[in-house]
Amino acid sequence: MSVRIRPLLAAWSLPCVVFSASAPAASDAVALVNGKPVPQARVDFILKEQIRQGKPATPELSRQAREEAIAREVLSQEAARKLNGSEALKARLDFMQQQALVNALREDFFLNTRPGDEEVRKVYDSLSARAGERDYRVRHILVDQEAEARALIEKLNGGARFEDLARTHSRDRDSAPAGGLLAWTPEGSFAPGFGDRLPKMGRGSLAPDPVRTRAGWHVIKLEDVRPSRPPAFDEVRPRIAESLIEQKWREYVQGLRSRAVVK
């Protein structure tokens, strides 16, 4: 029901296949596998990925990275010997090389794109204004049919507990176990229709009629109201910046696609 700012930058792991235009020099190798050098750069890449995933940089992690690089070289040599000429392997390698290039481009874009404070502040102000002046604490029961919603309202007016009916009848799997209770939500974040009803209700009151949204029919009970408390700018600035970078990336991709000559 609520609208939240979420970081959109997902962790894109680069494929572990390394494509090289020329064979690494033996002097730059950490080992020789059947006479073929395993380059230090490959070990460094594996180590960097492990650290990026949260593992501490230790001598043991460096040793493990070296062992993994050697194991990969052994397996890649066997794959080349056994599967050389396979069309399926060629197609896979082509796809993985292309994916590595795309991922590297995205990573470079995100590293070198930094929204200005003014741009971030503009988004923050817009979100704060949209949130409104009040937060609502609401319970609801979501069902498919209006008749079922009205029958539930009759039961509630007859003394049934809202929490019990929500647990047994609501299709909202997130709130049903909590008796239909939603988190504190800014007034501008509810679906049309649902949010329009709340200002007309008092604390602890039950909406006399069900409300319809795209999700279905809602039985609504207003638990509480409080003045809106938007998060501090510094608290959400990193997430807003990430969202802006993600938006800029999509625009960048769309621009490349529109300029590409496709016949």
Image (tube, grey):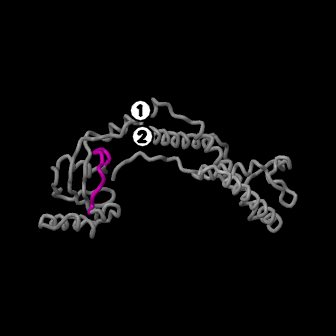
Give the residue at the far bottom of this rendering.
Answer: 168
Answer with left or right where residue 44 lies relative to residue 147. right
Please provide the residue range marked out in magenta.
179-189
Q: Amino acid at mark 1?
A: Lys
**Residue visible at 30% across and 44% down in the picture:** 188
Give the Cα separation between the discs numbered 1 and 2.
13 Å
Q: Which residue is mark 1?
A: 122
Answer with left or right where residue 171 lies relative to residue 210. right
Q: Say what secondary structure mark 2 lies in.
A: helix
Where residue 244 appears, as percent x and y from the top left, is 49, 39
Q: Which residue is mark 2?
A: 236
Give the residue at the far left of this rendering.
Answer: 158
Where residue 84 appears, as percent x and y from the top left, is 82, 64
- Dot 2: few (<14), some (14–19), or many (≥20) neighbours within 10 Å? some
Give the residue at the far top of this rendering.
Answer: 118
In this view, the mark in front (1 or 2): 2
Verify whether residue 186 appears in magenta: yes
Verify whether residue 115 appears in magenta: no
Q: Out of 120 and 149, give the one closest to the viewer.
A: 120
Where residue 94 appears, as percent x and y from the top left, is 73, 56
Where residue 215 appears, as percent x and y from the top left, is 33, 59
Give the residue at the far right of this rendering.
Answer: 35
- Dot 1: few (<14), some (14–19), or many (≥20) neighbours within 10 Å? few
Displayed quadrant of residue 145: bottom left
**Residue visible at 49% across and 47% down in the picture:** 8
**Residue visible at 20% across and 46% down in the picture:** 199
Q: Say what secondary structure mark 1 lies in.
A: helix
Q: Out of 149 and 68, give the one closest to the viewer.
A: 68
Answer with left or right where residue 5 lies relative to residue 153. right
Sequence-wise, which precedes: disc 1 or disc 2? 1
Answer with left or right where residue 78 lies relative to residue 104. right
